[in-house]
Image: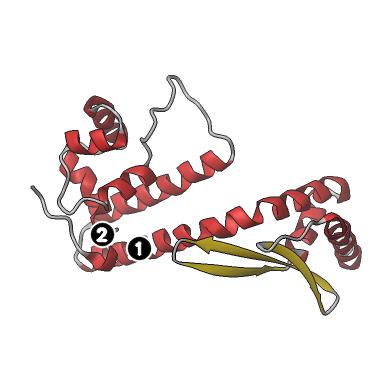
Amino acid sequence: MREASKEQIARELIAEIASEWEDTPEAFKSERDGRIIFTFVINQHNGSSVFFYDPQTEAEQAVEDSGSFFAGRVIRHMLAIAKQHFGNSHWQLREIASAQVSISDYEIFGMPDARKRRIEATMKLFAERLQEQLGGVKKGRNKKPGLSAHAICNTVLHFKEQPSQNKLAAVLKVSAKALREWRKERGFDTHEDFLKVFYDQRAGGEKLKPN
C-alpha cells in the first residue's frame, strides 16, 4: 500500500470516529495543524496527569497491517481503551524504573540469582496484568482470589516488618497452603526468598525488617 494512500485512509477513519466522539471533561478532542488530537485526563488521589494523543501513526500502521475495514475497528477500540491504558502507564513506569534500579544494583554487587528473580517477577507482573486486560485465561482449577504478583507486592509494602507466611495469607484472604503452592510454582523454595523480590519496592529503597 502506498504511503499517501495509507495516510489518507487513516486520516479519514480518525475523522469519522471523531465525528461520533462525545467529549467529556476527562476525554475530549481538538484539532491542531489539521490533525485530530485526543486529550485524556487521568485523575489520581493526589493529583492529575494529562495525555495528548495523536493516533495518526498507529492508525496508519493498523491500515497497513489489516486493511481499512478492520483498521477502523482497531482504531475505534484504541481510543475507547486509551484512557485506561494511559492510567496504567503510571504503575508501569514505577515498576519498570524500580526493576531497572534493582537489576543495576544486583549487577554491581554480583548477585546474578537475585537479578534473574527480579526480572522474572517483573515480567510475570506485567504478563498477569495483560492477561487481565485480555480477559484472562483459566487453566485447571479456578484462580484463587488475591494471588497475583501485583496484589502480593502491594500487600507486602503495607507491612512495616517482614510478614510471616500465615499473616500474609490472611491479609490476601487465601490459605497459607495456597500461598505456599503459588510461591513454589514460581520457583521460590522459602517464604523469605520469595519476599526478597519485593523488598526494594519500598519507597526510597527502605528494606523490610524480618520478625
Q: Which residue is drawn at the image coordinates 40% and 59% (left, top)?
A: 95
Image marks 1 and 2: residues in contact by CB distance under 8 Å:
yes
Quarter of the figure with residue 99: bottom left
Q: What's the amino acid at mark 2?
A: Asp
Q: Which residue is drawn at the image coordinates 38% and 46% (left, top)?
A: 150
On the rendered structure, is 14 left or right of 41? right
Placement of 121 over or under 7, stated as above or below: above
Query: What is the CA distance from the residue labelled 1 to the residue labelled 2?
Result: 7 Å
Determine which of the numbered discs, if any, sits on residue 98 in the image. Answer: 1
x, y percentage for residue 171? Answer: 27, 37
Q: What's the amino acid at mark 1?
A: Ser
The one nearer the camera, 125 or 116, is: 125
Going by the picture, which residue comes out furthest to the left? 211
On the rendered structure, is 68 left or right of 76? right
Q: Quadrant of the N terminus?
A: bottom right
The one nearer the camera, 208 or 2, is: 208
Secondary structure found at label 2? loop
Placement of 111 over or under 204, stated as above or below: above
Secondary structure found at label 1? helix
Q: Which residue is drawn at the image coordinates 82% and 72% (left, top)?
A: 35
Q: Which residue is drawn at the image coordinates 35% and 63% (left, top)?
A: 98
x, y percentage for residue 202? Answer: 27, 60
Quarter of the figure with residue 103: bottom left
Q: Earlier in the sequence, mark 1 or mark 2?
A: 1
Residue occupied by mark 2: 200
The one nearer the camera, 98 or 25, is: 25
On the rendered structure, is 151 left or right of 175? right
x, y percentage for residue 126? Answer: 46, 49
x, y percentage for residue 77? Answer: 73, 48
Determine which of the numbered discs, if any, sits on residue 82 in the image. Answer: none
